[in-house]
């Protein structure tokens, strides 16, 4: 685009059109009983959250859920690794978005030493089998990796430090990742080598430009789900029936929020 204003206008226009398609896609998923699971992975501050927010912004939250699990409890650490994720897989008519997923084991757990070498190797060996079972059960699994450069990541980290509304986004793990860039790169490459399969491929989203990443990812997501527009009966609002006389309590008996604007 010729300048930032033109780019921003084009972005808003395209985003609006894509979000309408997302609503149509969800209506089809609900109507057809399809099951969609979407994984968002990538480096810290790569733009996953912003993209998820734009995807879900106008969707029905009853049928579209975002799963962002906290660190496992002591009990969960003793379970089969994939066990804590299974209850969140979609039922018929649902879309589930994993804001980070079972791939924590091959990323932060591997780099930070939160799992053993045996647990790590076992994950790489069994993850494709787990995903094959998910897909064979009728769930469509779509995996996105958000890629950001080290320079852009540092810029975004600094922005979080300076913005009082974004301080919560800067965790100790984020700060540690600054020092372990190469370790995370190696972990990502090894993960792709074992889990970028023909039946469950990874799709890489270049995300140094957040707005481009959002448009590209949403457009690709829509292309992966072969949906059709669901026909709805025409909605006709009825005429309001106004009672001739009503005896209602005085407004003075209620507590109202003060108006400051």
Image (spheres, helix red, strand yellow):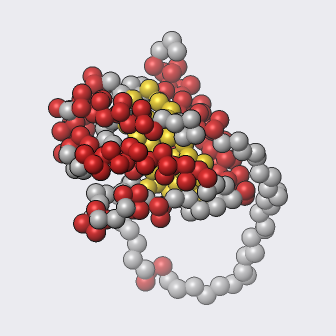
Q: Is residue 251 visible?
A: yes
Query: Picture quarter containing residue 12?
Result: top right
Q: Nearer the viewer, residue 259 or 238?
A: 238
**What's the residue at 36%, 30% (across, down)?**
189
- Give above or below for 69 relative to 252: above
Report x, y in % for residue 51. Answer: 46, 39
Count of marks placed on residues: 0
**What's the residue at 76%, 45% (across, down)?**
228
Q: Is residue 173 visible?
A: no
**What's the residue at 61%, 52% (across, down)?**
136
Q: Is residue 168 left or right of residue 208?
A: left
Report x, y in % for residue 81. Answer: 36, 57
Q: Is residue 160 left or right of residue 33?
A: left
- Give above or below for 165 relative to 4: below
Query: Picture quarter containing residue 21?
Result: top right
Q: Nearer the viewer, residue 239 or 89?
A: 89
Residue projecting furthest to the top: 2
Report x, y in % for residue 96. Answer: 52, 54
Query: Picture quarter containing residue 17?
Result: top right
- Give above or below for 61 relative to 181: below
What quarter of the picture does the C terminus occupy? bottom left
């Amino acid at each position: 685009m010729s300048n930032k204003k033109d780019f921003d206008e084009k972005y808003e226009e395209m985003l609006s059109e894509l979000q309408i398609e997302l609503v149509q896609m969800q209506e089809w998923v609900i109507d057809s009983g399809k099951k969609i699971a979407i994984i968002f992975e990538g480096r810290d501050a790569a733009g996953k959250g912003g993209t998820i927010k734009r995807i879900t912004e106008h969707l029905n939250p009853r049928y579209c859920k975002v799963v962002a699990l906290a660190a496992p409890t002591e009990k969960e650490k003793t379970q089969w690794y994939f066990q804590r994720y299974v209850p969140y897989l979609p039922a018929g008519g649902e879309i589930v978005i994993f804001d980070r997923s079972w791939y924590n084991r091959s990323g932060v757990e591997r780099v930070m030493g939160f799992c053993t070498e045996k647990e790590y190797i076992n994950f790489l060996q069994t993850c494709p089998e787990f995903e094959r079972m998910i897909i064979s059960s009728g769930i469509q699994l779509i995996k996105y990796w958000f890629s950001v450069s080290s320079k852009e990541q540092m810029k975004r980290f600094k922005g979080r430090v300076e913005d009082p509304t974004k301080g919560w986004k800067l965790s100790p793990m984020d700060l540690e990742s600054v020092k372990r860039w190469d370790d995370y790169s190696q972990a990502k490459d090894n993960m792709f080598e074992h889990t970028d399969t023909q039946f469950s491929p990874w799709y890489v989203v270049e995300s140094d430009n957040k707005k481009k990443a959002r448009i590209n990812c949403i457009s690709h997501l829509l292309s992966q789900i072969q949906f059709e527009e669901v026909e709805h009966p025409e909605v006709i609002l009825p005429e309001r029936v106004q009672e001739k006389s009503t005896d209602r309590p005085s407004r003075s008996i209620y507590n109202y929020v003060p108006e400051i604007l």
